[in-house]
């Protein structure tokens, strides 16, 4: 999301500095944050000491915020924080520019604590109404739904199979997608990185066969062709998804969606672009798959263009930036 946002802002003529981890896209002119693991030392033997990486990340964000609090920060109009770390929020009052933080997850205790400490220094956006409502007891936020690059997810011809894409982990529950597609009588292809091999071997692999295959971890263009060449996309979160990006990507390809009604997913779909089933109900998900497979592909793409695009998202963020700058000038 940050990569797409930065590229589109640059394309629109904005001067953008991206502070990110080593290995980020050099085309963005990234200022790399050094997150080197700390060497072994006596203090680490304290059982209460945090792991090396956590300390290294803490120091990286601390160094950045201290730098931006000085003269280096005076050239920026707005700081847009898309990290999940607490320091950019907790230290937002120390920098000279207004800070906008996008809430990409439900409340996490360390980030929630930072929001309470920030004492109104930050402004907040949330990637869905569901996420905004989750944070409402802690802070107000403006809903700015995530947007997708429509060119990267072109319309496909459809096909005979269902598709499931994402990280193959328990909280995404691809095994539910296989079981539901099988009950619906539609073959299914899974695609994505296996990040929990124990889960994959125990829950997914035994279900694979002639009507359920694993295509591997595909490059983006390959995945777009697979999704666009599918009859229906299946989305099966076992947790409350803050948004539901894979559903939006499928709709951009013209592929209707059958999904569990969890988190922000109901906000992505409309009655003519998808069908929802109660969470964890494989039987009703099978029915949703059969019904969604009959929906109009042109309408799915139209909905993506009108409501789910990267351009729409960046328009909203530009409005927020201008509002924050106006508040700063008025103060």
Image: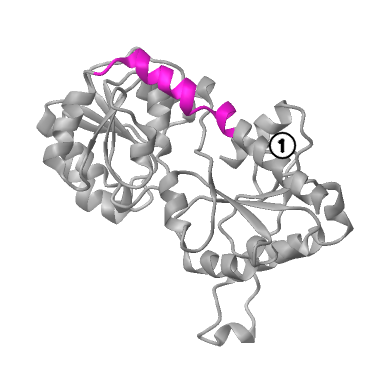
In terms of image quadrants, where is residue 34? bottom right
Main structural element of the magenta stretch: helix, strand or loop? helix
Q: Can residue 209 be seen in this view?
A: no
The vertical placement of 284 against 330, above or below, is above
Q: Is residue 326 left or right of residue 314?
A: right
290 or 215: nearer the viewer:
290
Q: How is the image coloured?
A: one colour
Q: Where is residue 136 in the image (x, y as percent from the top left)?
A: 47, 58
The vertical placement of 158 against 105, above or below, is above
Q: Is residue 162 visible?
A: yes
Q: Position of residue 30 (x, y in %)?
A: 73, 43
Q: Position of residue 143 (x, y in %)?
A: 51, 43
124 or 140: nearer the viewer:
140
126 or 47: nearer the viewer:
126
Identity of the residue drawn at 41% across and 18% down: 301
310 or 137: nearer the viewer:
137
Count residues near mark 1 (Cα–Cα under 10 Å), then give few for <14, some for 14-19, many for 20+: some
Identity of the residue drawn at 73% across and 31% down: 10
Q: Does the magenta run of residues contain 309? A: yes
| The C terminus: image quadrant | bottom right
The residue range painted magenta reads: 295-313
Q: In this view, does 306 lie to the left or right of 121?
A: left
**Residue matched to label 1:** 28
């Amino acid at each position: 999301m940050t990569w797409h946002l930065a590229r589109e802002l640059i394309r629109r003529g904005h001067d953008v500095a991206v502070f990110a981890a080593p290995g980020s896209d050099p085309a963005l002119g990234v200022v790399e944050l050094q997150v080197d693991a700390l060497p072994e030392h006596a203090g680490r033997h304290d059982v209460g000491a945090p792991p090396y990486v956590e300390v290294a990340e803490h120091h990286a964000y601390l160094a950045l915020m201290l730098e931006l609090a000085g003269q280096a920060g005076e050239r920026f109009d707005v700081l847009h924080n898309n990290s999940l770390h607490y320091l950019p929020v907790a230290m937002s009052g120390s920098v000279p520019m207004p800070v906008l933080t996008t809430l990409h997850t439900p409340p996490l205790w360390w980030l929630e604590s930072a929001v309470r400490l920030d004492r109104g220094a930050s402004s907040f956006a949330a990637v869905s109404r569901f996420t905004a409502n989750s944070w409402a007891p802690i802070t107000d936020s403006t809903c700015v739904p995530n947007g997708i690059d429509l060119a990267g997810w072109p319309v496909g011809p459809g096909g005979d199979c269902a598709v499931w894409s994402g990280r193959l982990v328990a909280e995404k529950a691809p095994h539910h997608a296989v079981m539901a597609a099988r009950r619906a009588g539609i073959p299914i292809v899974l695609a994505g990185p296996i990040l929990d091999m124990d889960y994959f071997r125990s829950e997914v692999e035994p279900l694979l066969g002639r009507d359920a295959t694993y295509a591997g971890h595909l490059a983006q263009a390959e995945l777009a062709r697979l999704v666009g060449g599918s009859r229906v996309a299946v989305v099966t979160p076992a947790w409350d998804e803050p948004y539901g990006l894979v559903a939006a990507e499928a709709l951009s390809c013209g592929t209707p969606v059958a999904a569990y009604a969890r988190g922000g997913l109901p906000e992505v779909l409309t009655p003519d672009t998808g069908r929802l089933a109660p969470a964890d109900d494989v039987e009703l998900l099978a029915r949703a798959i059969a019904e969604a497979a009959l929906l109009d592909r042109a309408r799915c793409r139209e909905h993506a263009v009108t409501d789910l695009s990267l351009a729409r998202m960046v328009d909203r963020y530009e409005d927020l930036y201008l509002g924050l700058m106006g508040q700063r000038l008025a103060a």
